[in-house]
Amino acid sequence: MSDAVQVETAPLAQRLMDLETLATSQAEQRGAVSDEIAAAVTELRSAASRETVANALRLGEELRLFNPHMFRLRTSADVQGPDLFAFLMEYGSVSELWLNFGPVLFGSLDPTKWDPRYGPDEENPVGVLWQPEQSATDIVGTLERHLLADDIDGRGEFDFAKALDALALSLQIAFAARSGDDKSAGPRGPLICLVNDEWAITAEGLQSLLADCHYPIGDDLPTDTLCPSRHSSHLWDDAIRYFNTRRQAITALSEAIVAYDLANS
C-alpha cells in the first residue's frame, strides 16, 4: 500500500478503531450492570433487609426500570388485596425507605396537597418508614398492624414474601426487556407493576411479557376478552381482573404526578 493511500485511509481506520473501542466499552458496561442486577436479586432473595430492598429500588430507579412514585408491588393473589408502594427518598447522604399501602380505588387527587412520599392519597396515608435498625420481621409486624388498624381490604391476604419476590422479578424482567436483543416482549417503558408471570402494567397499559401484545390504559377490558395465544388462560383472567380493578386509580395517580411536577417545576 502506497504512502498516499495510507494517509487517505488513516482517518477511516482510526474511526473504526474508535467504534470498536466504544462497542467494547458499552458491552463491558452492560455486563457490569447485569452482574449488579444479578447480585441485587440474589441478596434480596437470600437475606431480605432494609439494605437489600433499598438497593433493589435504587437500581430500578437509576436505570429507569421502574416508574418513579408509581411502582407498586403486588402482595397477594387476591386482586382486591392491597398493593405496596415502595419509595426511596434521598436527602444528600441520607435515604429514607417508605413502604405505603396504596388503596385499590380512590377519588380525585388534589395536586396542591399530594406529596409523592405518601403514595397515592396524602389525606389517608397508610404506610411506614423503614428505620435502619429494623429487621424485615419487624417491618412486617408494623405493616400488618397498619393493615389491621386501618381496616384495609384484603388484609388477610397480605404476604410480604410475595411482595419481595415481586420486587426481585420486577428488577430481572424490566432489565431483560431493556437490554435484550428481542424488543418485542417485555414491558415498554418503566414498570408500574408486575401482575404475574405473563403480564405487567406500565403507563401504556397492560402488557404481555411473552409477546408483542398490549392493551391501552383507557377503558376496562371486557372479562370475556379472548386469551391471547401463547398465554395461560388463568393468568390472563387474573391480569384482566387486576388491571380493571386498578386502571382508574393508576390513571388518576399519573395525572396527579404530572400536575405536581408542573406546580413544583
Image (spheres, helix red, strand yellow):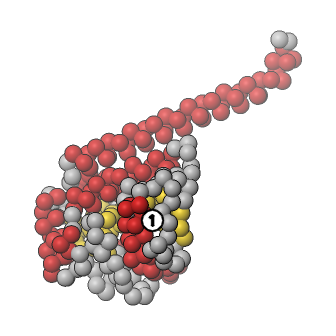
Tell me which residue sits at (83%, 11%) in the image: 1
The residue closer to the viewer here, 157 or 72, is 157
The residue beneath circle 1 is 201
Tell me which residue sits at (43%, 42%) in the image: 33
> In the rendered view, does 251 fall on the left or right side of 14?
left
* Count of numbered tags: 1
Residue type at mark 1 is Ile
> In the rendered view, does 32 fall on the left or right side of 20?
left
Tell me which residue sits at (21%, 69%) in the image: 157
The residue closer to the viewer here, 223 or 64, is 223
Q: Residues within 10 Å of mark 1 (few under 14, many from 20)?
A: many
Note whether residue 244 is visible: yes
Q: Could you say where residue 76 lies in the image, as x and y percent from the top left?
A: 26, 66
> In the rendered view, does 32 fall on the left or right side of 144?
right
Tell me which residue sits at (30%, 75%) in the image: 80
The residue closer to the viewer here, 72 or 182, is 182
Q: From what the image shows, is residue 53 above or below residue 154?
A: above
The residue furthest top is 1
Tell me the SS state at disc 1.
strand
Residue 232 figure quarter: bottom left
Note whether residue 189 is visible: no
Q: Could you say where residue 121 lies in the image, as x and y percent from the top left?
A: 34, 82
Q: Could you say where residue 209 lies in the image, as x and y percent from the top left?
A: 47, 54
> In the rendered view, does 201 fall on the left or right side of 74?
right
